[in-house]
Structure formats: structure tokens, C-alpha cells
Amino acid sequence: MCDLSSVSSGPGVVLASPGAQAFAERLAGKLGAVLCGVEQHRFPDGESGVRVLGDVRGRDCIVVAQLRDPDPQLPGLFFLADALHELGAASVGLVAPYLPYMRQDTRFREGEAVTSRSLAAWVSARFDWLATVDPHLHRIPSLDRIYSIANAVVPSAPAIALWVQGHVHRPFIVGPDEESRQWVREVASLVGCGHMVLKKTRHDDRSVSFVLPDLAPLAGHTPVLVDDIVSSGRTLADAVRRLREAGSATPVCVAVHALFAAGAEDALHAAGASRVVSCNTLPHSSNAIDVSAALAEAVRALQEDRLRCAAMAAGG
């Protein structure tokens, strides 16, 4: 059992879901918080068990979950949140650098479940606040539309821009499609360089085509393709290939969330990318851009708001 006896009501206690230990340690270090162990196991019948390895009574608890392949992880995450409340935690917040299910934000076909709303309801019922990095907000303007708890959306653009400034010679930021425009524009502004967005047409689940704008501004620059979620890698690979065929310099690819299915990174290199990097919202060998400091700031702000609201309520 971890010793939390020296922890006051300061920065809180950090607990890691399976696979998130390294990020939880990094976050705890930036918050000056104490790590508390979590024991999770699976019974022979497939059911999950969760045990908190410390006394969390009166503590503000911060659960860190990196939700690649979320379905096997979600029951244990919810069991952990319930257990922390039952064990007397003062509050239970969730740091999910990658927030899954956000792409199913409407009913595309008759009868489909709108799973982004379902997950939001489950999380809101168990956690007091949520901090995440660049969720896929396409048809939903903000998390407040579906989450009923306090939340903070941390932008990845500052960390990406800092990495580009330090690692890319004469960069020019390129978006593979219209949905990437918000990241492309912000990163380019922070770097102080030009940007453009390609026009993508999707023909089916496996086939897309691109219409390239005037590439004259790219001359003498290194294209930096930026996208929020990279799973199969086909969109980015096709964009890299088209840029190379048009005579551009060898592109660099940057992913905010490296979901990266098997072979995705290899496909990007095979298409002509010189380097593939990602933010550490999900653990992957391509992680080169750290967003933990920005998340720590967001957590501090959420905790301060909670304490301020509690003080106001106590004062009548």
C-alpha cells in the first residue's frame, strides 16, 4: 500500500490505469503530486477486479487513462472511479489525453448509436472533471454539449510548434484535409511560417484522392503534415505521396493522437515521409512531443475552480 499520510489537500493523488503509468508519473512530477498504486486483474471468467493500494480518504484523486483500444479498459476505469468515491476521495478527476468515441458524434446511418454521447454520460456520472487534449470536435462545438462535468481541452499546437521550430528546417505546415485546418492554422501561426490545406475526396473506406493547391509557396521549404488522429495512416500516406509526386521536399508527418494501426507508420515512410512523430497522448514509439506540462496546468486550474466553488457554496 502506498503511504499517503503526508499528502495534504494540495496537488492531489495520481493513479494510473493500465498502460498509463509512464504518463501518470510524468504528470505527477509536474503537479508535485503523489502516485498511488492500482491493482487490476482479470478473473478466469473474464471479469475484472480493481484495488486501490492506498488510503485516499479526503484526497483529490487524479486518474490517468490513455485510452487506445478503449473497450477493454473502460469497465476497469469506471470501477476505479466508483471505488475512489466509495473510499472517501474528496474528488475524482479524469485525465484522458486521448478521448475516444468522439468521431461518432451523430447518427450517420439509421439506427446507429451516437457513442460519443453515451461515453460522455458514463464519464460524467463517475468523475468530477475531465482534462483531455484536442478531442475530435467536428459537429460538436465543445465538450460542454455532451459532458455535464467541468472540463478542460488542452491544445496540442503550442507543443507541436515548439518541436517543429527545433527540428525542421524552413517548415511549411500542410493539412491533409479540411478537418485539419484548425491545427494547421494554429501551428503555423505559432511557428511563424506559411500553411496550406489539401482538398480530400473520400471514395470509400479505403480510397481517397487529393486536389493540390498551388504548391509554389512550398519551394525551398520542408512540408510538415499535421493531423489530429492517425489510425490506418492511409490519408496521410496518400497526401505524402501526392506531395512527393508534385516535386515537394520530403515531408515530415506529425500526429496529435497516434492510434497507428499495424503497419501505419511503415506506410508513411514507404510513401516518402522522412520522419513520423506524435504527441504522447497515447504511448507509441513515435512519441516526440510532450503535452504533460500543458495538461498539468489544466488540472491545476480545474482543481482551483472546484475549490473556489466549494468555498462559495460553504459561504452560503
Image (cartoon, rainbow, N blue to C red):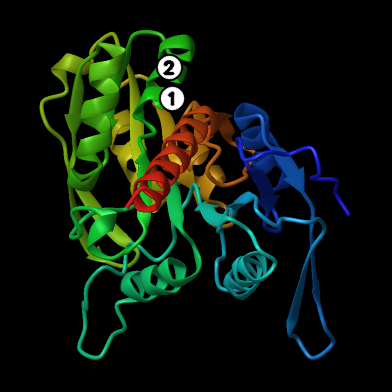
**Disc on res. 162:** 2
Q: Residue at x 54, y 44 (%)?
A: 265
Residue 75's place in the image compared with 303, above or below, is: below
Residue 221 pos. (x, y %):
30, 12
Closer to the camera in the image, 83 or 199:
83
Amino acid type at image mark 2: Leu
The N terminus, quarter of image: bottom right
Residue assigned mark 1: 159
- In the rendered structure, the answer to whether residue 163 lies left or right of residue 200 reads right
Q: Secondary structure at mark 2?
A: helix
Residue positioned 65% across, 53% down in the render: 58
Say whether marks 2 and 1 touch (CB < 8 Å).
yes
93 shown above or below 164 = below
Q: Specify whether residue 134 is in view.
A: no
Closer to the camera, 4 or 111?
4
Residue 301: x and y in percent read 42, 36
Mark 1 secondary-structure assignment? helix
What is the quadrant of residue 31 in the picture?
A: top right
The residue located at (44%, 72%) in the rendering is 125
Residue 87 lies, with reference to residue 250, above or below; the image says: below
